[in-house]
Image (tube, helix red, strand yellow):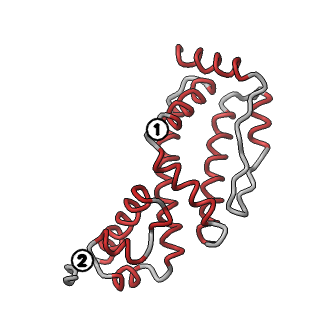
């Protein structure tokens, strides 16, 4: 491999982060290795190691970059929703439309890999907290009388300390939930 052109450290670091992010979205978080990032950025593995002394930290930074961008985008979509029900409809439609499958794979892999990578495990917990904060914020729009569902959903924190999130959506009356989402779509 020929020698990479000299670049300012901040520019080189951003280039390597971009390569790791693209690699994770294309092939999964487990594919973010020293050699794979170097090949994607067209640099030597030694250069990647120079800027990232720990691959655990690079994997965690890559996960955080991908997921924080998703959360920021969803935060904007939810802020524009006229009601919590419309926000839930927007959230479900957006997350289930198939366009975010690459990000979903990154989330799932991060939960699994976080069991053996403590830096990644901490990043997963931080991003789960950001999701919970988003849910709390959308429920707080119902104040001063939040619904029982909002109170229950914001009172629980998924157990992600082991790398596996245990949060789930349940509906006692799925048909009623589907009708609520349809009504929110019409608004």
Residue behind mark 1: 98
- Above or below, comparing residue 72 to residue 66 in the picture: above
Q: Earlier in the sequence, mark 1 or mark 2?
A: 2
Residue placed at 41% from the left, 61% from the top? Answer: 21
| Observer-nearest of 22 and 30 | 30
The secondary element bearing badge 1 is classed as: loop
Q: Mark number for residue 82?
A: none
| Observer-nearest of 141 and 164 | 164
Which image quadrant is residue 15 in?
bottom left
User: Where in the figure is residue 50, as x and y percent of width and height?
Assistant: 39, 84
User: Where in the figure is residue 134, as x and y percent of width and height?
Assistant: 62, 43
Q: Disc 1 to disc 2, how far (Cα)? A: 37 Å
Question: Mark 2 and mark 1 in contact (Cβ < 8 Å)?
Answer: no
Residue behind mark 2: 7
Q: Quadrant of the N terminus?
A: bottom left
Q: How many marks?
A: 2
| Tag in front: 1 or 2 | 1
- Above or below, comparing residue 134 to residue 78 in the picture: below
Is the residue marked by circle 1 packed among few (<14), some (14-19), or many (20+) residues within 10 Å? Answer: few
| Observer-nearest of 58 and 32 | 32
Residue placed at 48% from the left, 38% from the top? Answer: 76
Is the residue marked by circle 2 packed among few (<14), some (14-19), or many (20+) residues within 10 Å? Answer: few
User: Where in the figure is residue 42, as x and y percent of width and height?
Assistant: 26, 73
The reply, left or right, for residue 167 in relation to residue 14 is right
Residue placed at 44% from the left, 73% from the top? Answer: 33
The secondary element bearing badge 2 is classed as: loop
Residue placed at 64% from the left, 20% from the top? Answer: 178
- Above or below, comparing residue 51 to residue 61 in the picture: below
């Amino acid at each position: 491999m020929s020698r990479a052109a000299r670049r300012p450290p901040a520019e080189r670091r951003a280039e390597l982060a971009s390569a790791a992010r693209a690699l994770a979205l294309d092939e999964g978080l487990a594919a973010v290795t020293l050699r794979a990032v170097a090949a994607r950025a067209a640099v030597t593995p030694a250069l990647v190691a120079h800027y990232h002394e720990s691959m655990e930290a690079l994997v965690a930074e890559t996960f955080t970059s991908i997921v924080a961008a998703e959360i920021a985008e969803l935060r904007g979509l939810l802020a524009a929703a006229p009601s919590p029900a419309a926000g839930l409809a927007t959230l479900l439609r957006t997350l289930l439309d198939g366009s975010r499958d690459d990000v979903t794979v990154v989330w799932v892999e991060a939960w699994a890999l976080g069991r053996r990578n403590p830096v990644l495990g901490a990043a997963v917990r931080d991003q789960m907290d950001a999701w919970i904060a988003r849910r709390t914020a959308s429920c707080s729009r119902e104040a001063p009388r939040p619904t029982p569902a909002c109170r229950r959903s914001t009172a629980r924190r998924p157990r992600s300390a082991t790398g596996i999130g245990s949060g789930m959506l349940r509906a006692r009356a799925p048909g009623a939930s589907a009708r609520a989402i349809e009504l929110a779509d019409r608004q």
